[in-house]
Every structure is written in C-alpha cells, then in structure tokens.
Image (cartoon, grey):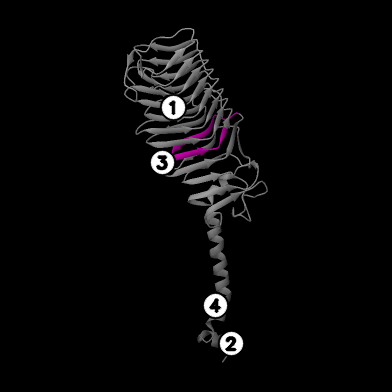
C-alpha cells in the first residue's frame, strides 16, 4: 500500500493532519491577537513601575509604565500597585478599582489639559491612595462623574485654577454617590472640592484634610450633604459653603472641630430662599476671616465654637438666621450680629 493510500485509509490520520493543525492553530491565535490587541489575561492585582513598559502584562515581574495600561489589565474590584517613585500619567477609571501608592513612594500625575484622574465607574467603588496630582494647565485634578463611592486617602492635589468647573476634586453626579476624603491636602485651586448632583444625593465625608489657598475651599451646591471633621480651611476667598444654585435643591453641611481661618468669608449657609441650605457649626475655631459666618436667606446652627478676630464675626443677608446653643464665644471681632434665636444644644 502506498503512503497516500495508508493516510487515506485513516491508519495515521494524526500525521496527515499535523501540518494543517499547526497552521490552523497559528491562524486562530493571530486572529485572536488582532481582535483583542493583547493575549494577557486580566488580573486581580497589577503593578506599575518607573522602568515598566505598557507592552508588559503588568505583573510584579513585568510591570506596566502607566496607570491607564494597568487599569486595562485589572479585574473589576482589583488593585493597581505603584512599585517605585515616578510620574504615571492621567487615567480614566471605568470600573471598580484601587490605585495604591505605598507610604514613601511618589506617584505623580501631571495634568497639562483636562482632568488628571477621571472616575466614571458606574455602580463601582474606586479608591485613590497616596497620589500627587499637579495642575500644569489642566482643569480638574480628580473628576468624579459616576460610581457608588470614591475614596481619596493620603493624596495631594494642587494647582487647578481658573473658572468653574476648575477644582482639585469635582464631583458632578447625575445620581447619588459618596465622596470620602481622608488625610489629604488641596491647595492653590479654584476650589479644593466642588460637589453637586442632579438627582439623588452626593454625600461628602471629609476628615483630617487641609484646604489651603483655594478660591473656594469646599463648595457644596445642589443635592448635597456633607460632614467635615478635624480639618483646616485657610487663606482662601471662601472657606466652606452650602449654597444650592437651583431652586428646590438642597445642601447641608456639618462642620465639626475644624479651623477656618484667613478667608474672605469663612462659612456660608445658603444663597437664596428657594434653595434650602443649612450649616451646623460645632466645636470649631473661626478666626481671622473677613466675615466669620454668613447666613443668606437660610439658617445656621452654632454650638461650642470660638468665633474671634474676624472683621465681622456673624453676618446675615436676605433673611438669614443664626441659632445658638448658648455656648459659643463670639469675641474680639471688629463687629458681629447677634444670634437670632436660642435652641437646645444638639
């Protein structure tokens, strides 16, 4: 029997098919690479390093060079870890992910245009830890567009000046979300934090954070509720403001154990009667401002505060009111209005 007859009778089919199988497998692999752009599998934990390459798989042994490349290879809910000090570029986050720079590692993002970190994570939770974001012509340091929660920890954001929406952090949501900031600093920007929501509520929780030399330190407008604790808001035009801009929408801020100093106006409750606002000021020092506390067409509550050394300690406009728990020290100001009512201490 000839070799051809042997193969045709099926005695050695694997040999007859071997050349075709190799060619087919190669063609299939090439087509998959062409379709996906990468054969790397997504991982729960990826890495970036100064000597990395975005052509790598972002593993510990083969790190990537930029945040964007690493995010693209990270599973939802996973982490991008910074291995050493460098600049890692702006990034867009469209899934739940954490970007973590350990203590002692400088993870820089230089922003020449637009936003440094854009968070559009749908219903996901995003964490940014240990980053330094510098505005070098850019508009927004961190642009929180969507996501159930955004945690910012140990991060420094500076140099985002100019007209609105310029800000260190801008949270402009279509629905509800949570912005949590810890142990961070926001400096030399049009606003340290600027927040609003079209529907639902943007909830802001800030603790142990410095706001320095911003035109507006913390500005919460439509559909917002905030708690600010153990923080400093100094040397700006406007320190802390709860001032909705759209009729029927609300804003409230609880300000506890803060220092508000050296601003044109320290604390503001309200902008107009059609947009309810409320500030609760407790156990804080308000000092060295042009106006310490201003209530415009809306109320504020004060308990256990020291309001001193301001040009005007307390001021009202357009029917604003001030409620006191009778334990504030309003002393040493050039001028000050009296509280309009006494209420039980909260």
* Quarter of the figure with residue 130: top right
Percent across and percent down for residue 174 are 39, 34
Mark 4, Cα crowd under 10 Å, few <14 / some 14-19 / many 20+, is: few
Q: Secondary structure at mark 4?
A: helix
Marks 3, 1: nearer the viewer: 1
Front disc: 2 or 3? 3
Expressed as whole percent of the image width and height from the top left, the position of residue 164 reads 49, 24
Of badges 4 and 2, nearer the viewer stands: 4
Task: Name the residue that disc number 3 marks.
Answer: 148
User: Of circles 2 and 1, which is in front?
Assistant: 1
Task: Classify residue 305 as left or right of residue 103.
Answer: left
Tell me where residue 153 appears, x and y as whole percent. Answer: 52, 38
Residue under the point 59% across and 36% down = 132
Q: Residues within 10 Å of mark 1 (few under 14, many from 20)?
A: many
Q: Check if residue 111 falls in the magenta segment.
A: no
Q: Earlier in the sequence, mark 2 or mark 1?
A: 2
> Which mark lies nearer to you, 4 or 1?
1
On residue 256, which mark appears? 1
Gap in angstroms between the C-alphas marked 2 and 1? 91 Å
Q: Which residues are magenta?
A: 137-156
- Which of these two is toward me, 341 or 13? 341
User: Which of the image's four quarters has the N terminus?
Assistant: bottom right
Principal secondary structure, stretch drawn in magenta: strand
For label 2, the crowd category at 10 Å Cα-Cα, with few meaning under 14, some 14 to 19 and many 20 or more, is few
Residue reaching furthest front? 327
Residue in the foreground of this view, choosing between 115 and 46: 46
* Residue labelled with disc 4: 17
Q: Is residue 22 above or below residue 83?
A: below
Q: Residue beneath label 2, please?
A: 3
Inspect this view and state whether residue 331 appears: yes
């Amino acid at each position: 029997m000839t070799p051809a007859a042997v193969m045709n009778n099926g005695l050695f089919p694997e040999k007859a098919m071997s050349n075709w199988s190799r060619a087919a497998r190669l063609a299939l692999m090439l087509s998959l690479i062409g379709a996906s752009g990468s054969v790397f599998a997504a991982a729960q934990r990826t890495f970036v390093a100064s000597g990395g390459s975005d052509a790598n798989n972002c593993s510990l042994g083969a790190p990537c060079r930029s945040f964007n490349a690493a995010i693209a290879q990270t599973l939802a809910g996973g982490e991008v870890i910074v291995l050493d000090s460098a600049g890692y570029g702006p990034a867009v986050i469209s899934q739940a992910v954490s970007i973590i720079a350990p203590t002692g590692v400088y993870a820089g993002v230089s922003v020449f245009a637009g936003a440094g970190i854009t968070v559009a994570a749908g219903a996901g939770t995003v964490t940014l830890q240990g980053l330094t974001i510098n505005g070098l012509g850019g508009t927004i340091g961190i642009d929180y567009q969507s996501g159930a929660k955004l945690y910012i920890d140990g991060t420094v954001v500076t140099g985002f000046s100019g007209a609105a929406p310029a800000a260190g952090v801008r949270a402009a949501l279509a629905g509800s979300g949570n912005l949590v900031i810890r142990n961070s600093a926001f400096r030399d920007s049009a606003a340290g934090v600027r927040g609003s929501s079209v529907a639902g509520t943007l909830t802001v929780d800030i603790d142990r954070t410095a706001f320095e030399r911003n035109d507006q330190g913390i500005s919460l407008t439509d559909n917002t509720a905030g708690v600010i604790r153990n923080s400093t808001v100094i040397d700006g035009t406007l320190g802390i403001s709860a001032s909705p801009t759209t009729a029927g929408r609300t804003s409230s801020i609880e300000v506890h154990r803060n220092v508000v100093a050296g601003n044109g106006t320290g604390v503001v409750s309200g902008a107009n009667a059609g947009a309810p606002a409320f500030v609760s000021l407790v156990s804080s020092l308000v000092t060295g401002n042009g106006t310490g506390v201003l209530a415009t067409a809306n109320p504020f509550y004060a308990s256990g505060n020291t309001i001193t050394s301001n040009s005007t300690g307390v001021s009202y406009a357009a029917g604003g009111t001030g409620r006191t728990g009778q334990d504030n020290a309003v002393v040493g100001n050039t001028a000050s209005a009296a509280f309009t009512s006494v209420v039980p201490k909260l």
